Image: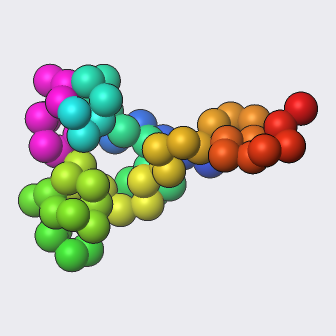
Amino acid sequence: MADDYVRATCHACEGEGCSYCDRRGWIEVRPPATACPRCEGECCIYCGYTGWAGLRPKYDDETGTAGSCHAP
């Protein structure tokens, strides 16, 4: 499942690291990485202030069991 996303530089901090990208400077989005259609990459509530569309959900993990009460 990790291959379903690509890394993109956080627009809010321009790669410096901030609370919106968990201090990493990058976020994961579905390919192809496209700017948020609502703010055109300028950061808004719909893109989580990262400037990108198709963000990986915060609690999504590579095993696909995030949030599951029945995780192995």
Residue furthest to the right in view is: 72
User: Image point 21% across, 63% down: which residue?
Assistant: 45
Front residue of 62/3: it is: 62
Residue 17 located within the stretch drawn in magenta: yes
Q: Position of residue 31 (x, y in %)?
A: 49, 54
Residue furthest to the front in view is: 69
User: Image point 24% across, 40% down: which residue?
Assistant: 20
User: Image point 78% across, 44% down: which residue?
Assistant: 69
User: In this view of the protein, can residue 55 be seen by the observer?
Assistant: yes
Write down the quadrant of residue 52 in the picture. Answer: bottom left
Residue 46 located within the stretch drawn in magenta: no
Q: Position of residue 19 (x, y in %)?
A: 22, 33
Left or right side of 27 for 40: left
Write down the quadrant of residue 22 in the picture. Answer: top left
Which segment is the magenta one? 10-18
User: Image point 16% across, 63% down: which residue?
Assistant: 44
Left or right side of 37 for 60: right
User: In this view of the protein, can residue 35 be seen by the observer?
Assistant: no
Helix, strand or loop: magenta stretch: loop
Q: Position of residue 25 (x, y in %)?
A: 25, 28
